[in-house]
Image (spheres, grey):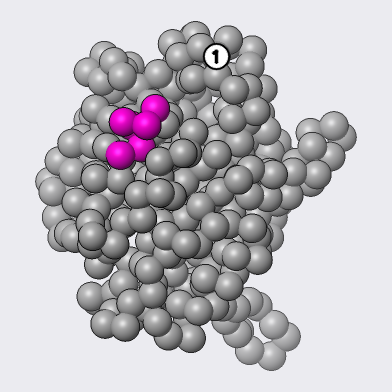
Amino acid sequence: DLVTVGELLIDFTPVPSVDRPTFQQNAGGAPANVVTVAALMGKKTAFIGKVGDDAFGRFLCKTLTSYGVDTSGLVMSEEFPTTLAFVHLDDSGERSFSFFRHLSADVMLNTSELRMQVIENTKVFHFGSVSMTEDPSRTSTIEAIQAARVNGAIITFDPNLRPALWRNQDEAKEQILNVLPYVDVLKISDEELSFLTGETTFQAGALSLKKQYQNISVILVTLGAKGCYYLAVCGEGSVPSFPVNPVDTTGAGDAFMGTFISGLLDTGKRPTELHQEELVNIIRAANTSGALTTTRPGGIPALPTREEVVDFMNK
Ligand code: ADP
């Protein structure tokens, strides 16, 4: 149903304890989180990327497999180490990252290492973030998108722009704008939207992208605790999230996206065919998933199951 390509890394999240803070070692990386959420929602999933052939890489591969994600497209590199990220949390659960990623495996995925069989039959192909920052992974990602498109897949994209990852802002903007012509569903935060378009409101930003890239049939602007604004072929509007007590917002956007994709797959429709009511229902589930994720620490272990999302929505 869903294939994602991109980063798979270890994130070290601080865990408060009585005497001294410790770190929890978690599997993370935006597209890896997205694919895991979709697996938790009951979808058939596969991940394409590269990790080091080291203890971290093996842990990551085992983690995805334990959620039922097909890892036959995950390359274990003998040459490059697995990427490590260190999460800093402020009092409200907002996070920032430091990366140990000099020549790390996830941006070293070569075109020749892409397993095309994994891509050929998928209904949705999702990509984003670090795989776009550098070659060779940038070229490989674009090649994978093309292969998925030829086979009729719906293309979803989350730029997941973290300025610290890019050598310069102009390059970041250019690379993100370069791939928008391939995209059917764009998930973007309001900060990213103003960075890309220069517009001061997210409504104006979304409208400007929609006009320029008519191929994008659904734009989802995630607004943290405020939920999501959407601009789609079927209409536009806001869908509020649910009140929660956040402890760690890591992965909320990915949980949102994985749940959105899963809901889209449930309809069996292309994004252009969605009715507004269907779209709003999918976004409501996605908001729930994002909100639940903020209530637990860590990346992949914080992601909710389908039952948790359904139970929370019915409360
Ligand atoms: P990102 O910036 O990574 O895209 P957000 O922080 O906007 O992600 O979170 C994604 C979604 O998760 C939001 O659209 C919202 O539905 C939900 N969410 C995030 N933070 C909260 C919160 N504090 N309270 C309720 N829902 C939240």
- Neighbor class of circle 1 (other Cα within 10 Å; few <14, some 14-19, many 20+) is many
Image-quadrant location for residue 75: bottom left
Q: Residue at position x 24%, y 53% from top? A: 140
Residue 300 pos. (x, y %): 59, 61
Residue position marked by numbered label 1 in the rendering:
274
The residue at the far right in this view is: 315
Residue extent of the magenta highlight: 147-152
Depth check, front residue: 86 or 101:
101
Residue 307 pos. (x, y %): 80, 44
Q: Quadrant of the N terminus?
A: top right
The residue at the far front in this view is: 117
- Three-letter code for the amino acid on which mark 1 is drawn: Leu
Image-quadrant location for residue 112: bottom left
In the rendered structure, the answer to whether residue 308 lies left or right of residue 16 reads right
Depth check, front residue: 108 or 24:
108
In the rendered structure, the answer to whether residue 67 lies left or right of residue 130 reads right
In the rendered structure, the answer to whether residue 267 lies left or right of residue 230 reads right
Residue at disc 1, secondary structure: loop
Residue 55 forms part of the magenta stretch: no
Q: Residue at position x 56%, y 43% from top? A: 258
